[in-house]
Amino acid sequence: MFAGFNMLHDMMPSRPFKTGYRAYSVSMLPGNERSDVEKGGKIIMPPSALEQLTRQRVVYPMLFKLKSDSTKRETHCGVLEFVADEGKVYLPNWMMRNMLLEEASLITVESVSLPVATFSKFQPQSEDFLDISNPKAVLENALRHFACLTTGDMISIIYNSKVYELCVLETKPGPAVSIIECDMNVDFAAPVGYKEPEIEPKKEDGVCVDSFEMDHESGGFQAFGGAGQRLDGKKKKEESVNGDAPNAQTASQQKGTYTRGIPDYDYQPGVIRFMRHAKPQQEKEEVAEDFKYFSGAGRSLRDAKSRK
């Protein structure tokens, strides 16, 4: 008989837990200060709630939706302990601020089942969050004290005795997700008030000049344009009398010819040009019109007497 009753009890579907409580901040909890509650997203409920949850066979992990009829705000949380006074629940201060609750405000606590998180995006509310060397690791460590996340919540984490607030911008696969034993990707948005550093262009004679345009227009850019030096300290043979090495590359640029290593700015797609260094043709000497080839008189190396 008892075996059949137990089997019937196991087959009965679980009923949702839904009860009204007076909400108080953790600072109102009797006894020693509970800083561990402020570090996460879990609440403290009365012992009668545990008895009722066990009797109604609520699925683990125990997740709850907190809703305020007066402020029309809601959020989701887990439970840390069942040691509160009857009719009361104690919430972290950041959760009280999100729901716009005052001490002893009436809220409804309802058990829910949430999907497992796969992605979440946060936005720091201060640029001081960028001073943390590894913010992703700090956030992942702080989220171990949370049971779930709700889109739109402003959560608080504590690192090096400093409180950082982060807004939950997005959660997937739903607006409220469970983060217990999950593989979740975390992303950050730019902090509130953050501006990208502006790169100022170079200034020349009080006028801002773009370095690329200046080099392109004036021909200032030269690939490997530095002067060479000998290891023995002697001067190079190609140096001129004044000691200035000739720059063939600059000279070729002034003539308008293509130099190896310099981009061809006149390039047209589909056209292949072969650059050749053509030698200048020598000018022909002008010849007089009355000039005749081999018209001179002949001369003999012997005297006339020797011929006789």
Image (cartoon, grey):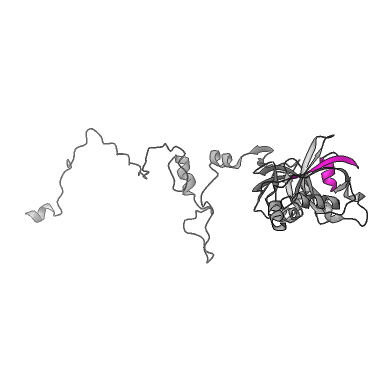
Q: Position of residue 95 (x, y in %)?
A: 82, 45
Q: Nearer the viewer, residue 152 or 110?
A: 110
Residue 99 part of the magenta-drawn span: yes
Above or below for 103 versus 4: above
Along the line of sight, which residue is nearer the eye, 227 or 303?
Answer: 227
Judge whether residue 24 is colored magenta: no
Residue 261 on image: x %, y % = 46, 48
**Residue at 43%, 43% in the rendered image:** 258
The range drawn in magenta is 91-112
Q: As drawn, is 294 to the left or to the right of 115? A: left
Q: Spot the residue most to the left.
A: 308
> Which residue is the extreme one toward the top?
289
| Residue 192: quarter of image | top right
Q: Position of residue 31 (x, y in %)?
A: 93, 56
In terms of depth relative to the viewer, which is nearer, 194 or 175? Answer: 175
Q: Nearer the viewer, residue 249 or 40?
A: 40
Q: In what quadrant of the picture does the C terminus appear?
A: bottom left
Tell me what residue is drawn at x 71 percent, y 54 percent.
5
| Residue 75 shows up from this direction | yes
The x, y position of residue 184, in whole percent, is 65, 51
Quarter of the figure with the N terminus: bottom right
